[in-house]
Amino acid sequence: MHTLTAADVHAAADRTAGRVLRTPVLQVQTGWWLKLEQLQHTGTFKARGAFNRQLAARERGELDPARGVVTASGGNAGLAHAHAAAELGVPATVFVPETAPAVKVRRLRALGADVRPVGTEYARAHEAAVRFARERGAVFCHAYDQVEVAAGAGTLALEIAQDVPGLDTVVVAVGGGGLFAGVAAALEGSVRVVAVEPESAPTLHAALAAAEPVDVAVSGVAADSLGARRVGDLGFDLARRTGPVSLLVDDDAIRAARQDLWSRFRVVAEHGAATAWAGLASYRPATGERVAVVVCGANTDPSDLR
């Protein structure tokens, strides 16, 4: 496995320049900032990794204009890869579980993706996507556990470091670990990373306890975006290398954090993104510590925000 480094993240930033949005950083109180990545294309940070993966494949001559890309995701990663493929003028095939919400399937098709429901679990969709890539010659795009995908995600950390001089800490939510891996690689040796997960989907926390990636049961309000059953190899490798602060928060804290982001700052966040904000209550920054929290996505129904 290629080791993800800051050089990969810097290369991704150069490669994706002009393709992704430089999202703003909002200071919400003394020493605290929000990285408003929910304003990114398709509503999450995933567009960064999608563009980096597909552009890198095109540079190497792997991206056939007729065969395009394939991924397995009924959620944010699928939307991001479909968007990037449309921008690059290549077809996107997205395998989803048959249980994928109709609204997400409609959004994928609106972006021009060929949506193929398979099985009732993500694992079946993943297997089908890998097989499709092998048989059809499409570029396989993982939802999180690929160097180019994680490196693309990490480019948001470079922006934070530029916009917040003297940055001490970045707080991120963890699902499969791609965002964490990219951020940790980008800031390795200079900035602390706090990795926050739901108690009901503790992939990184469980892996650190077991000293290897392990399967966990997944449930809870953030499962739609932080619902990986096992942390990726890249995320686990970066955790071993960088020693993040690993925190767990419960569903009540996540719901409260999502409401708090809206009530105080009028920031709409999906439950997965609010997980990072919920982690601040447990982390409790020191006096004078300069902390940025990544609001990583807003693909949510805002009707219950008050």
Image (tube, rainbow, N blue to C red):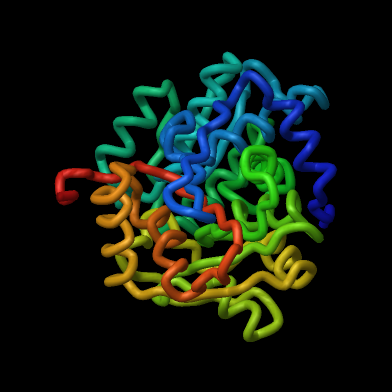
Q: Residue furthest bottom?
A: 210
Please tell me which residue is depicted at 42% across the width and 21% down the height of the picture: 112
Please tell me which residue is depicted at 63% across the width and 85% down the height of the picture: 209
The answer, for residue 229, to whether it is visible in the render is yes
The answer, for residue 134, to whether it is visible in the render is no
Q: Is residue 257 left or right of residue 51?
A: left
- Please determine whether, in this image, residue 280 is positioned above or below residue 127: below
Image quarter of residue 180: bottom right
Question: Percent position (x, y) of residue 134?
Answer: 68, 40
In-front residue for pair 61/237? 237
- Please determine whether, in this image, residue 242 is positioned above or below residue 29: below
- Please determine whether, in this image, residue 282 is positioned above or below residue 277: below
Image quarter of residue 275: bottom left
Q: Is residue 17 left or right of residue 264?
A: right
Question: Percent position (x, y) of residue 24?
Answer: 51, 34
Please tell me which residue is depicted at 34% across the width and 56% down the height of the picture: 271
In-front residue for pair 199/253? 253
In-front residue for pair 157/233? 157
In-front residue for pair 11/132? 11
Image quarter of residue 190: bottom right
